[in-house]
Amino acid sequence: MHTLGLNNFSAAGFRVAIVVPLFNDQITKLLSQGALETALELGVVETDIEIYWITGAFELPLISLELASSKNFDAICAVGAIVRGDTPHFQFVATETARGLMKATTESRVPVSFGVLTTDNLADALERAGGSVGNKGSEAMYAVLHSAHLLRQIRGGEHDDK
């Protein structure tokens, strides 16, 4: 029997983009740092990582789709922080960002992560950007590189025997 995706994997040789909004940068800088550190830990070399700073979370889908469609990257790690305010704006931005990132990954067939925090306040976001809950940017990078590795196995016919 062949199994895929259960091994400890290396992301050596992968090219990765990290897409980061400037809005809520006290959070997004921490998320992008976690994503960068995880990529390096998994074997991606620094010269194969590009970081794109954008305005806000709403721009994540377009930039992620463009990067994925360029075929210059094996994985796109999208991180961000959408913090609830007193208006319904939060719901619109969060919903459409999630929908757009899913569309970017399915249309391009390149893994795009959803490392976007949707929290009630900045304190909750800080807890998820390296605080007591961990760093969701790091988790998003792990997930997207794991998917890229698995896709490479599926498309290339490589199998990990377990």
Image: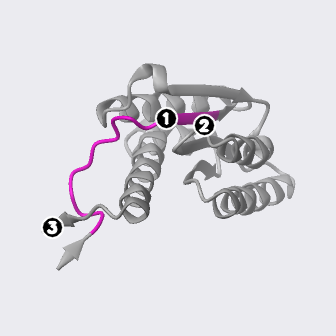
Q: Earlier in the sequence, mark 3 or mark 2?
A: 2
Residue that badge 1 annotates: 15
Q: Where does the image place residue 65, in percent across and percent down from the top left?
A: 72, 48
Q: Which residue is the site of mark 3?
A: 161
Q: What crowding class fits label 1: few (fewer than 14 Cα within 10 Å), some (14-19), or many (20 or more)?
A: many
Q: CA gap, disc 1 to disc 3?
A: 26 Å
Q: Please, what is the three-letter code of the amino acid marked with disc 2?
A: Asn
Q: Position of residue 44 (x, y in %)?
A: 38, 31
Residue underneath mark 2: 72
**What span is colored magenta in the figure?**
4-19
Q: From the viewer's perspective, is 103 left or right of 16?
A: right
Tell whether label 2 touches label 3 (CB within 8 Å).
Answer: no
Q: Is residue 112 above or below residue 161?
A: above
Foreground: 134 or 55? 55
Q: Which residue shows up at 29% across the image and 61% down it?
A: 158
Dot 1 or dot 3: first in sequence order is: 1
> Residue most toward the bottom?
1
Measured Cα–Cα span from mark 3 to mark 2? 30 Å
Which residue occupies 72% across, 62% down? Answer: 103
Amino acid type at mark 1 = Arg
Above/below status of 32 relative to 117: above
Tag 2: Cα neighbours inside 10 Å, few (<14), some, or many (≥20)? few
Residue 47 falls left or right of residue 102: left
Marks 1 & 2, CB-CB < 8 Å contact: yes
Q: Secondary structure at mark 3?
A: strand
